[in-house]
Amino acid sequence: MNKKIELMPGIIPDPVTVETKAGIIEYSLTGSNGPVVMVVHGGLGGYDQARVMAARWINENNFRILCPSRPGYLGTPLESGRSMEEQADLFASLLDHLGIEKVVVVSASAGGPPGYVFAMRHPERVSAMIAIDSVSGYYDLPEKVGPVAEALFLNSFGQKLTSMMEKISPASFLKQLFVTEAYYTKEQMKTHIDFALNTPSALEFVDAFMNTMYPYKPRKAGTDNDMAIYRTYTRLPLSGIQCPTLIIHGTHDADVKFYDGVYAYESIEGAERHWIEYGSHLGFWVSPRAAEAQTVAAEFLQRHAG
């Protein structure tokens, strides 16, 4: 059963599950006016993670925010689309069901491949695309994900411990997070931990984002499916993307490597880019340069939506 949960203060999506011509899919649609932004979540996610990633920088008064759960995540069965092509067709079928002609696609992390493939496979449905630290080719668990990080983030019991750590010792939690998600020196690590601890919006995001990875069990099938597919990639043929595209990537991302962003920017004709200097995998939301990156994305969205 779909549950209505407050993900962040004032962010209360109301997820529903529908049967489209391409399969069953869960989604939330918030906002009442304006063009539609479809947010494609990453690994361990769902509609809730997508909505948190869109919070604060996409104006809900000017845009409607569509957040589908990809196959294998939460209320969308894996059978609705194992391949990225099937997932792209599922998105198109959802738009048909909702009577939505075009969207701006915002993808992040492991949401990159289905977002890119959707833009290539259904170009008439995409007015623009923003890819944030998105996978554009071969991907496996980052080399910095050791046994400790894997135990903390990739099972429900570990996630409970992580949640306790976040509340008891935010600094220790942030250090473990950045160890996995960034290539930082000790000084850079301290700078980013201090920034997060002293920036309410950053802490708000981290807390909400971590909650959208729990519980792990209803997200495991989708995460495993992503990993099985992405390990077979070399590089996606992104030259087929014709819509206005903005590539945003952290230069110090240890999860989805900076080259994924560089490759996408160099492969898509006319693409714009914004590199987040010293940005981790979560640099768009949690870094001293997050506000600048979000402003760039919001201005691009305003120019190309509709």
Image (cartoon, rainbow, N blue to C red):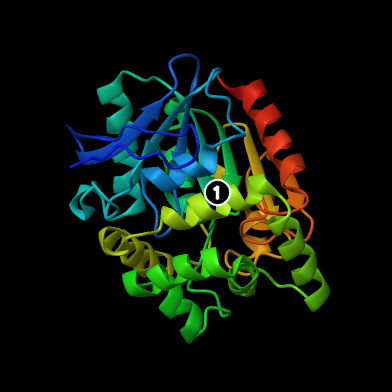
Residue 179 falls in image quadrant: bottom right
Q: Residue 205 at x, y = what percent? A: 57, 49
Can residue 270 be seen in the rendering of this structure? no
Q: Outermost residue toward the right?
A: 187
Left-right relation of 184 to 19: right
Q: Residue 185 at x, y = what percent? A: 79, 76
- Of residues 259 and 3, the one drawn nearer to the viewer in this rendering: 3
Residue 231 falls in image quadrant: bottom left
Crowd class of label 1 (few under 14; some 14 to 19; many from 20; radius 10 Å): many
Where disc 1 sits, the SS reads helix
> At x 36% / y 49%, what residue is drawn?
46
- Of residues 123 and 8, the one drawn nearer to the viewer in this rendering: 8
Q: Residue 69 at x, y = what percent? A: 33, 45
Residue 181 falls in image quadrant: bottom right
- Of residues 301 and 238, the one drawn nearer to the viewer in this rendering: 301
Position of 272 relative to 195 (above/below):
above
Left-right relation of 289 to 144: right
Q: Outermost residue toward the bottom?
A: 147
Can residue 284 be seen in the rendering of this structure? yes
Total marks placed? 1
What amino acid is at disc 1? Leu
> At x 37% / y 43%, what residue is drawn?
47
Q: Residue 31 at x, y = what percent? A: 45, 21
> At x 36% / y 51%, what residue is drawn?
84
Q: Outermost residue toward the front?
A: 168
Q: Quadrant of the N terminus?
A: top left
Left-right relation of 70 to 252: left
Q: Outermost residue toward the top?
A: 33
Position of 198 relative to 59 (above/below):
below
Q: Which residue is mark 1?
A: 238
> At x 67% / y 35%, what residue is drawn?
297
